[in-house]
Image (tube, rainbow, N blue to C red):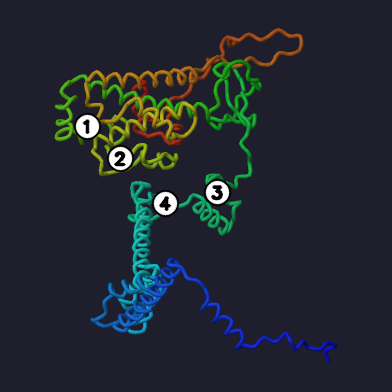
Amino acid sequence: MPDTLANPYAYQSPIGAALKNLSGVLTKKSTEATDIAHLETALALKQKRENTAALGDALRALGTAQFDRRAAIDNAVRAGVSPEAVGGFERYNSANQYGAADPRTTNAFVGAGGSYGSTAAGEREQIAAANQRNAAAIAEQGRQFDSKPTTINTPTGPQIVRQSEAYGQPAVEDIGKVKGAVARNAYASPAGLAGADDATKQFIGVDSKATPTPHNYVSNGQNFITYDGTTDANSGKPLPPGGYMANAVGPAEAVGLPAPVRNDLAKQDVSNQRFRGLLNYTKELAKQDPNNFGITGLVKGTVQDTAAAADNIARGLGYSGIQDGLANARTRAVASGVNPSVISGVFDPKLPALHSAADLMVFSAAEALAGQSGRSVTDKDVKIIKNIVGDPTEWSANQQKFLSKLDTVGQILDLQQQVIDNNLRRGSPAAPPAAPGAASPPTSPAPGAQPAAQPDPLAQARDAIARGAPRDAVIQRLQQSGVDPAGL
């Protein structure tokens, strides 16, 4: 129970409060401004009530031909109804009357502030556009894949083609797989790998002996190269008795170059001489008829003499014709890793014959340049020569320009040939080692001794052919040197 007593005088009667308020209204003083404000408020409320009722009447016609959208919007503005609310009424009615996929529902959705991409029609258009972009991207990827260059094997050697043209064509065999097959066959033989010949062992890389060290052996004024101290490395015959092992003192020409070095130089010599013959042949043709240049020469070469000139250039390089030369050059270029685009005339059979012959000549000159450094031809070698010689279409400019470019190539060839000639010359043999306190032996041979043996041109020619030099070019070189090639 509360510990205090309620105050009976604190009670307020509702009737008393109402009378108090009424007396306040009756006794309150009014002004004109206040009365106008009250009237305006009452009028606004009346208009809102009427326009709201009119909007309701207009919305009853939603989905029928009698629906007046502009009248509904007008009533909504006057009644103070937001546009979103009006759009929501129409969207609600369309979705239930026509269905979500109907265009009228789509329009009502967008009219109510929705995104077109969120509607069924908008999503279909987005998917169609994405599919179109994807199809274009896939088509471009397929085009790039089909146009990618690849190498196939042909009867004339490896050939660069588009990947789309390589289906069903034989692939170039991987050298590692070929070696593996040869090794398996040798291992499966009755004698195994031990019974394989030296060539097979060297090819598959299982030869156990390291490359021996060459030594100089001097006997009766003659210098020999030997690996074992008992056998001549060049002839395979026993060394003559009474000689001694000589140390290499002085330049290489003083003691004689090893057989592998001489063979490499001889191969370079054949390549240079072959290209020298081509240069001389081409210069003579250029000097004979000035009409072969300029516009007249372009028409003449295209219509009449292009194929014949191409074959003549190929024969000048030691081949039977332009096709033989191109096939041989393609094989060597692929083996050396030369980019086909650098010498497109060698790889693309659709180019004019003159272009093919020109690139064949450029590639042969580049090979001679690379051979001087004891390496395979590269893209850089081809570009150096091509920058000097120029494009075949530029050769038609005038006779003097053409001859000048050939002279420049000839000067480069002369510098290379000078190095080869200097190193192929044989000097006198090395002196034997002197005993302590003894005088040095004379450098000239003793009376009655045989003169120093000269290198056998036929033997050098055979070595060059064995190392890959064209046989026809080697024979031509021998004939130019006055050597009968019948014994080759």
- Identified by mark 3, the residue type is Ile
Of labels 4 and 3, earlier in sequence is: 4
Residue displayed at 39% across by 18% down: 414
Q: From what the image shows, is residue 71 above or below residue 333?
A: below
Residue displayed at 47% across by 19% down: 419
Nearer mark to the viewer, of 4 and 2: 4
Marks 4/3 in contact by CB < 8 Å: the verdict is no
- Identified by mark 4, the residue type is Val
Q: Which residue is mark 4?
A: 172
Of labels 4 and 1, earlier in sequence is: 4
Q: Which residue is mark 3?
A: 204
C-alpha distance separating marks 3 and 1: 43 Å
In the rendered image, residue 56, in percent from the top left (x then y), is placed at: 34, 81
> In the image shown, does 114 or 90 lie closer to the viewer?
90
> In the image shown, does 377 or 427 lie closer to the viewer?
377
Quadrant of residue 472 within the rendered picture: top left
In the rendered image, residue 350, in percent from the top left (x then y), is placed at: 25, 44
Nearer mark to the viewer, of 3 and 1: 1
Q: From what the image shows, is residue 121 above or below residue 153?
A: below
Which numbered disc covers residue 324? 2
